[in-house]
Amino acid sequence: MSQTVIQVKDLSKAYQIGQIGTGTISRDIERFWLTKVMGKEDPFLKIGETNDRSIKGISDIVWSLRDINFQINQGDAVGIIGKNGAGKSTLLKLLSRVTSPTTGEIKIKGRIASLLEVGTGFHPELSGRENIYLNGAILGMRKKEITRKLDEIIDFSGVERYIDTPVKRYSSGMYVRLAFAVAAHLESEILIVDEVLAVGDAEFQKKCLGKMGDISKGQGRTVLFVSHNMAAVKSLCQRGIVLENGLVIKDDTVENAVATYLTGNFGIQNHKIFSSEYDRQDFTLHELGVNPVGKTPNAILDEYQSIEFNMLFTLKHSAKNLHVTYVLNNEYGETLFTFSHSNSGSKLKQGLNKINCKLPEGFLNIGSYYLTFYVIENSKTTLFVEKDILTFTIQEGERPIGSWMGKEPGFIKPKFQWTIE
């Protein structure tokens, strides 16, 4: 059984907006004595609100995190995901002891190496080489340990030419290259990485993901990773924690966590059942959905799957020569293509029809798509049209560590036959 290295219990963090303080010196001293010396809760903390940036609040106290509970075992690679303002960076700062919690407790076994912001822990007047020793000393490492790793760190960072230059002259990309190299190679038991890798170029991002994979799977060290790149999260992590407005809404396998982030709580719905809104004189539309072939409705869709559109449709009059047509638009409102069952030679029958259309494996690229639905009579008269009747998203598929991460140009990505002689 794996050893628990991080245990978080009833963790909350409140921030005060605007003027800070109780209003009197005596109460400020009392607050300091009770919270800092006695370790008790703040008696002057007002009732706060959930940290939802999209609405105006009535309180000057907001909860960046509220009643967070989880534990992480040695060797786990955990992705912390959520929208901007969800509380991800606050959580990592609490775990890294950059700031202290308002309530709750954190128990950690082992040394932590954190990469929270570009240049965190670097002294701008010192050279890159001197900052390597400084960071190692902060982590509690001896000079001999750092010296043993020095050449490896410099080589990984790719900034050897500037290693004796003060880091205040580094670009943001050079900063993060050296900072990650230091954090990853110094012998800490827990590595915490925030969204800073986005500053680096694609080649260095792939290199970092490969190194974090080695740290977690090869060396048995624990990795906490925050990113908005779901392909990177899925390739590196086995578990995901989803935050929304300071609350944990999902703590599960990385696949289920990513699905919750992309679909479950953020408005994307790829399956709809209709009651009577589309009951017309000639037809009734009962159900419409898109899902991976062979999987259940609302299953997550990714770029490598074959997907299918399913419809339940009742034709009320056999004499009517009707067919259904889909028009697929991208997130910019541009029409990608039109497809209809009439092109296959199939015809609707009177009564209930189960209509299925499959797209080839890996046909649609990463992105959001909007489906418009038509009912056409005699191939020329539009009886019914509903724009954006269905919305769905294609997310990043599972890619091997070290491969290209992110969306490639275009909206479709068909597989062509290639030969090389």
Image: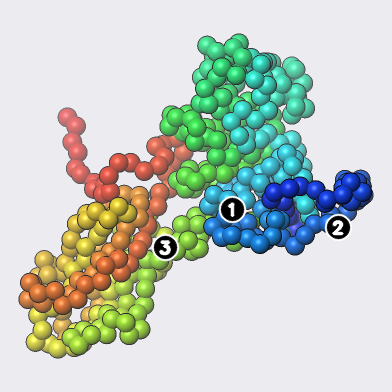
Q: Earlier in the sequence, mark 1 or mark 3?
A: 1
Q: In the displayed structure, would residue 25 be above or below residue 301?
A: above
- Left or right: 378 as drawn, with respect to 302: left
Q: Amino acid at mark 2?
A: Pro
Q: CA distance from mark 2 to mark 1?
A: 26 Å
Type of residue at label 1? Ala
Give the CA distance from mark 2 to mark 3. 42 Å
2 and 3 marks in contact (CB < 8 Å): no
Q: Residue at point 35% right, 55% down?
A: 368
Near-viewer residue (420 or 165): 165
Residue 17 lies left or right of residue 243; in this view the side is: right
Choose between 31 and 146: the one closer to the eye. 31
Q: Quadrant of residue 291?
A: bottom left
Identify the residue position indicated by label 1 in the image: 86
User: Residue at coordinates 55% horizontally, 19% vertically from top-left?
Assistant: 170
For mark 2, what is the residue?
Answer: 43
Please report contact status of discs 2 and 1: CB closer than 8 Å, yes or no: no
Instruction: Specify whether residue 210 is in view.
Output: no
| Residue mark closest to the camera, 1 vs 3 | 1
Mark 2 / mark 1, whichever is N-terminal: 2
